[in-house]
Image (tube, rainbow, N blue to C red):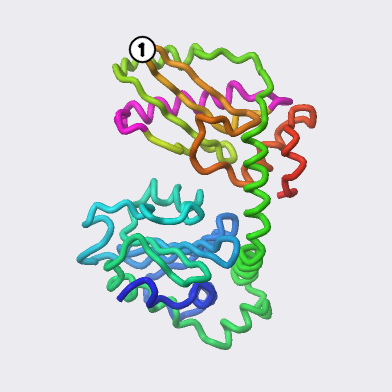
Amino acid sequence: MEADDLASADDLWWSWAVLAISDRLPPGAEVALDPEEHVLSYDYGGSWARMQRIGGGRAVLWGLADGSVKDAISEHLDPLGGAPDWASSNAVWRSIRTSTPGFLAWYSRDGWDTSTSGMFDGVIDLLSPLLRGDPHDVAAARSGELGDPLLLAAQGVAHVAAQGAIRNRLKSQIHRQMRDTDETDRGLPVRPTLLARWHRVSEPGIDFEHVVLVDQGDLVPSSIDPRLNETLLVSLTNVLKELHRDEAGEESGAWLAARVRVAAGRITLDRAFDSLPSWFDAKGPTLRALTWEMKQRSAAWRPAWATLLPPD
């Protein structure tokens, strides 16, 4: 069986949500909804699944079917390899960083597609219980007739996802303007003392580049240089977290992205407070992250593109 044997994203979403408040789940199974990330979760024994609704009626599905003979882990595959850019959302990226999935699929108007072809026999068995929602309850949940808070939140997510194409176009427009925006000088040193001290003490002995994006105060690596081992990466991340906090101004806000670069034994820090510079070539910040950051600044320190941001 393959990904295209799955039910439609909308059918799966609503049956999954309805089961969260029913007694039809397998014993010990748990379902939850994160309305902020638009993600439904399902955990059952050593297996788990996540589904995120994305603008334009699209969706991403990923997880692990415990006991699968063949999956992305056994085949040493990158689940995001070959996936469209929109399928690599912040929620998916953060989840994959903390837990290794065995499968990943995405849904668009063409149906389901996957980067883990030939690895869905166990997945179909894992997800089948999620399609056991009572049809009458599913129909009532879709129309908003059931007053359960989780189902009302699920309806809100589905509505936002259906309208999301507008937000995606707006995000692309803002990102283009950010590319053309000049940074306002904040007088910060190219070699902060804390970073220079880290370089001197840790003695990495290599040239590297490390780029991070800030998502509502959290630092998310947009690219990890393979030359950085885990110990160096953890200590460098701690330094960047401290710098991000210390360099933030009450009026002028904090940086949106940063690049640490070591070349010829010299370490430097590039920051982007107002723009997406040429050295940042990864997926840009979400509208929510940009809105959150602009709310921390006074009007005088908000770039022109900030006027396009939605209120939340």
Q: Is residue 2 left or right of residue 20?
A: left
Quarter of the image for residue 139 reads bottom right
Q: Is residue 205 above or below residue 87?
A: above
Q: Picture coordinates of residue 14 (x, y %)?
A: 54, 75
Q: Picture coordinates of residue 116 (x, y %)?
A: 32, 62
Question: Residue 263: within the magenta?
Answer: no
Tag 1: residue type? Gly
Predominant SS of the magenta segment: helix
Q: Is residue 305 left or right of residue 97?
A: right
Question: Residue 228: within the magenta?
Answer: yes
Q: Nearer the viewer, residue 251 or 261?
A: 261
Extreme residue in the right direction: 299
Q: Secondary structure at mark 1?
A: loop
Q: Nearer the viewer, residue 234 or 89?
A: 89
Which stretch did the figure color magenta? 225-252
Q: Is residue 294 above or below residue 193?
A: below
The residue depicted at 56 percent of the width and 61 percent of the height is 54
The residue depicted at 34 percent of the width and 61 percent of the height is 103
Q: Quadrant of the N terminus?
A: bottom left
The residue depicted at 59 percent of the width and 28 percent of the height is 272
Q: How many marks?
A: 1
- Residue pointed to by mark 1: 265
The residue depicted at 46 percent of the width and 52 percent of the height is 88
Q: Nearer the viewer, residue 280 or 142?
A: 280
Q: Is residue 198 above or below residue 14?
A: above
Q: Is residue 279 above or below residue 113?
A: above
